Image: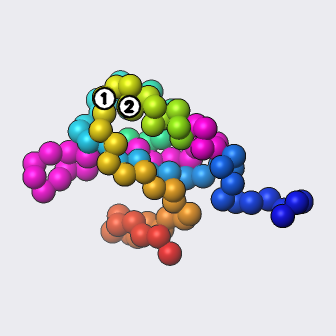
């Protein structure tokens, strides 16, 4: 596959959604740069935080995951997003 760009390569930029346990305060949320922190209430009364955004490569993703690990923040889900469509009602789906 020489000469063709692979959009799924580990060194290509991609959108990610990382779900972590708990609520991140504003100061901590700012430390994730390009990732947007979105708190999501859970049915059990707890909170998840979604970190959503574009990272330059999987090395940057690993850096975020290591940072979360070092802060003892539980990582629930890591998902690479191909595309995301947001409806007028605010719900999101992937085609």
- Of 63 and 55, nearer the camera is 63
Viewed as shown, does residue 34 lie left or right of 42? Answer: right
Quadrant where the N terminus sits is bottom right
Viewed as shown, does residue 15 lie left or right of 87? Answer: right
* SS state under label 1: loop
What residue is pinned by disc 1?
A: 72
Whether pointer 2 and pointer 1 mark residues with C-beta atoms closer than 8 Å, the reply is yes
What residue is pinned by disc 2?
A: 69
Is residue 39 something one can see in this rendering? no
Is 41 included in the stretch rendered in magenta?
yes
Residue 39: give x, y in percent of width and height: 28, 45
Residue at the limit of the structure toward the front, as seen here: 1
Is residue 46 something one can see in this rendering? yes
Give the magenta part as a residue range. Answer: 40-60
Q: Quadrant of residue 22?
A: top left
Residue 65: give x, y in percent of width and height: 45, 37
Viewed as shown, does residue 48 lie left or right of 69? Answer: left
């Amino acid at each position: 596959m020489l000469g063709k760009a692979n959009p799924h390569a580990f060194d290509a930029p991609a959108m990610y959604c990382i779900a972590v346990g708990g609520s991140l305060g504003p100061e901590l949320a700012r430390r994730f740069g390009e990732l947007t922190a979105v708190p999501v209430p859970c049915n059990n009364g707890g909170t998840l935080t979604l970190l959503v955004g574009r990272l330059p490569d999987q090395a940057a993703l690993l850096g975020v995951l290591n940072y979360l690990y070092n802060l003892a923040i539980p990582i629930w889900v890591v998902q690479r997003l191909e595309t995301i469509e947001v409806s007028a009602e605010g719900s999101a789906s992937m085609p």
